[in-house]
Amino acid sequence: MAQLNVSLADVNEKDAEGGGGQIIPRDRYLLNIVEGEVKRNSKNTGDLFDYKAEIVEGDFAGVKIYGNINVTHQTLTAQKIGQAQLAALAEATGIGKANLTDTDQLLFQPFYADLDVETYKARDQSDKERMVVKKFIHAGNANEPPPSKAAANDNVKQTATTTATTTTQAQKTTTTPAAGGGGRTMPWQRTA
């Protein structure tokens, strides 16, 4: 038997969740980055900011969110998107994109973000899910509601209002003859 020379009393067992971490409802959360480093990406095509963020309030306080942002990349589109995300994160933290010179400035700076669930292939080729930052939110916009796009796995029923609107639009469609004849329905032509 091996003697353990550590105390586990203050260790958070939620940190044992490897891979994608805990799956929580899609929503807007207040987070801060607790760890981060710039390193070479796995394909050696650029540098990325690899970070671990933590939700800091609410029912899911303490849940970890893992992410990375391209800082440089040999593909200009990937680099442009990554640098835009980094600028959005700097703005969301209140540091400001013009003032961000070191990723350590981002540590423990609260920011809002819309989180979503992403499906990915694990090393064993099985489908796994993880939480990802969909959008960094500037504090001035934090009170605006997050997008209400319901994903297929959220099991959200459509409301009767949506059905009624569709029916009303379909009733406004006229049957105007087409330019070449033939009396087909033209949905873009409506009676006023």
Image: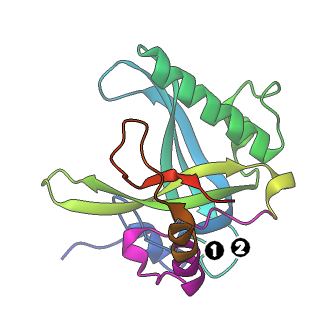
Q: Outermost residue, left direction?
A: 124
Left of 176 or right of it: where is 125?
left
Quote the CA–CA distance across marks 1 and 2.
5 Å
Q: Outermost residue, front direction?
A: 181
Residue hosting label 1: 61
Left of 45 or right of it: where is 143?
right
Q: Is residue 5 visible?
A: no
Q: Amino acid at mark 1?
A: Ala
Residue range corresponding to the magenta coloring: 144-166
Q: Determine whether the residue tagged by mark 1 lies in a helix, strand or loop.
A: loop
Q: Is residue 154 magenta?
A: yes
Q: Amino acid at mark 2?
A: Glu
Q: Is residue 78 magenta?
A: no
Q: Position of residue 66 (x, y in %)?
A: 48, 52
Q: Position of residue 142 (x, y in %)?
A: 79, 60
Instruction: Tell me if label 1 and label 2 are in contact, CB under 8 Å.
Output: yes
Q: Is residue 92 above or below residue 7?
A: above
Residue hosting label 2: 57
